[in-house]
Image (spheres, helix red, strand yellow):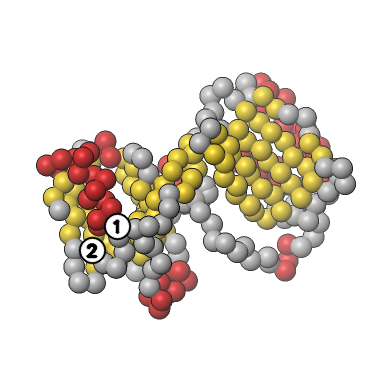
Amino acid sequence: MPLTWRRGPFLRQDPDVTQPIDLARAATALEARRPLWSAAGHDVSPALWTDDREHLAVQLASPEWQVLLTVELHSAGWAHLHFASEAGAIRDPCRVRSVDAWGTLLDEAVTRASRIRLQPAKLLAGTCTTGWLDWIHGELWLLPGHLVRVRSGLLQSVLNSQSGSGVTAQDPYRLVGHDPEAIRRAHRTNKVIPFTDIHHARLHGGVSTSGMTLTMTDGTHHKLLWLSTEPARRLLRDRLLPVLGPRLTH
């Protein structure tokens, strides 16, 4: 899930983005946006500096948001977006190549904060595809009211094929920033499926591959496939049966 979906545990540092960021100019870019944020009804903190002046941050909140946003910039070129609510907090790190990129990040962070909902999510499968002709794996997540499929990429698909997925039924729930618009926009095979829009679902199992087909109330169809060694089928049956009743075939 773009975090606001989970990133890998290690982020590659590209050799061409090691130039430090001028934090004084970054603070000027921040201050230029303050009147716009205030006019939009957001509460904006003063620029927050560490004693060594190597870290700059700002906090924003809004009555219409469900999260508190903190955007932090390190002089080394790392930025961190923090989204917090009563449910907990998540952090999204990224590289910032320039002061202009920092300004763009500020604008995008505020837009994301207006949409994000922090929710518990359970990873059901790491090898999920959207059909027999889709060879690129993705992650299948269970949220309180949605199923979410997020494309992983070619490299992860190759690794899964070589070593198998590590997803188990005992994997804990994780807090994620649910942003349906960003998920759908990230790739055409990403899916956000609300339980309330499911007309009928069929779970099926096989020796090597299991899956689910869904018919939505608007007439659209979805197909999801994953390796049978993953726990998605049983976990989906247990979660969807109370919701769908006879509209679930399993």
Q: In which quarter of the image is residue 210?
A: bottom left
Label 2 neighbourhood size at 10 Å, few (<14), some (14-19), many (20+)?
many
91 is higher (above) or lower (below) than 129: above
133 is higher (above) or lower (below) than 162: above
Query: Is residue 130 toward the left or the right of residue 241 in the image?
Result: right
- 245 or 160: nearer the eye? 245
Query: Is residue 140 toward the left or the right of residue 223 in the image?
Result: right
Residue type at mark 2 is Ser
> Does the residue at mark 1 contact the one at mark 2 (Cβ under 8 Å)?
yes
Q: Position of residue 217 (x, y in %)?
A: 21, 38
Residue marked by disc 1: 232
Q: In which quarter of the image is residue 7?
A: bottom right
Q: Position of residue 239 (x, y in %)?
A: 26, 45
Numbered badge on residue 210: 2
Q: Which of marks 1 and 2 is in front?
A: 1
Query: Is residue 234 toward the left or the right of residue 82 in the image?
Result: left
136 is higher (above) or lower (below) than 70: below
- 43 or 110: nearer the eye? 43
- 122 or 69: nearer the eye? 122
> Residue at the location (88% across, 46% down)?
52
